[in-house]
Image (cartoon, rainbow, N blue to C red):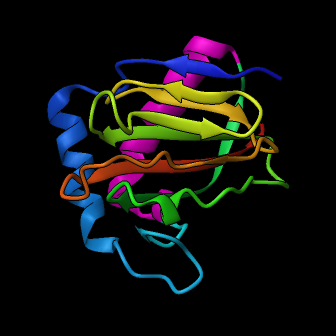
């Protein structure tokens, strides 16, 4: 199993539209760090076209046939307590799509084994779900970082 980096997932207008359509679902969920949506975004009919684009981009770039099982959006402000080391055990692959990031500080994901993997805004990092990872911190707490997390099973 490999780690894949896929750039330019959406047109800029589509990326902004995805952010706008997901923001209303953000919540303070008691068991979760930062602010996030519930894990059912992929089941919302008006968001399905976005998930189809993501799925197609993954297949084009990796030849993997994956089914989206869960998805949620995260909002964080770079606080160290939001690193929250975890994995997505029980799934095959997981992905982070970087909707809106702060270049040079929080654009990427921190992995226990692999260190920090830097990613650009509008790119997607696909990795084996068992890898332990977290959100990197940054010193500019006034800047919001939005990511979309997705869990996959094999088709």
Q: Which segment is the magenta one?
A: 41-63
Name the residue located 77 percent from the left edge and 41 percent from the top edge. Answer: 131
- Residue 130 in the image: state x and y as whole percent: 82, 44
Name the residue located 59 percent from the left edge and 82 percent from the top edge. Answer: 31
Q: Quadrant of the C terminus?
A: top right
Q: In this rendered view, identify the residue nearer to me: 109 or 43.
A: 109
Q: In this rendered view, identify the residue nearer to me: 62 or 95.
A: 95
- Residue 123 in the image: state x and y as whole percent: 41, 26
All told, the count of numbered labels is 0
Name the residue located 33 percent from the left edge and 51 percent from the top edge. Answer: 146
Please identify the quarter of the rendering in which residue 120 is found. top left
Please identify the quarter of the rendering in which residue 133 is found. top right
Name the residue located 48 percent from the left edge and 59 percent from the top edge. Answer: 80
- Residue 138 in the image: state x and y as whole percent: 36, 46
- Examine the rendered structure and indicate whether residue 86 appears above or below residue 106: below
Instruction: Please say whether residue 56 is visible from this viewpoint.
Output: no
Instruction: Please say whether residue 72 is visible from this viewpoint.
Output: yes
Question: What type of secondary structure mainly makes up the magenta span?
Answer: helix
């Amino acid at each position: 199993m490999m780690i894949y980096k896929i750039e330019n997932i959406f047109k800029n207008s589509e990326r902004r539209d995805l952010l706008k359509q997901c923001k209303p679902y953000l919540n303070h969920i008691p068991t979760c760090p930062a602010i996030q949506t519930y894990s059912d975004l992929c089941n919302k009919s008006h968001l399905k076209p976005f998930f189809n684009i993501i799925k197609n981009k993954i297949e084009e770039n990796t030849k993997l046939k994956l089914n989206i099982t869960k998805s949620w959006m995260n909002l964080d402000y770079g606080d160290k307590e939001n690193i929250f080391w975890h994995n997505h055990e029980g799934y095959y692959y997981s992905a982070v799509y970087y909707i809106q990031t702060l270049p040079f500080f929080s654009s990427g994901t921190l992995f226990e084994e692999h260190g920090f993997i830097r990613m650009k805004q509008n790119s997607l990092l696909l990795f084996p779900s068992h890898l332990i990872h977290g959100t990197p911190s940054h010193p500019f707490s006034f800047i919001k970082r939005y990511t979309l997390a997705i869990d996959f099973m094999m088709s």
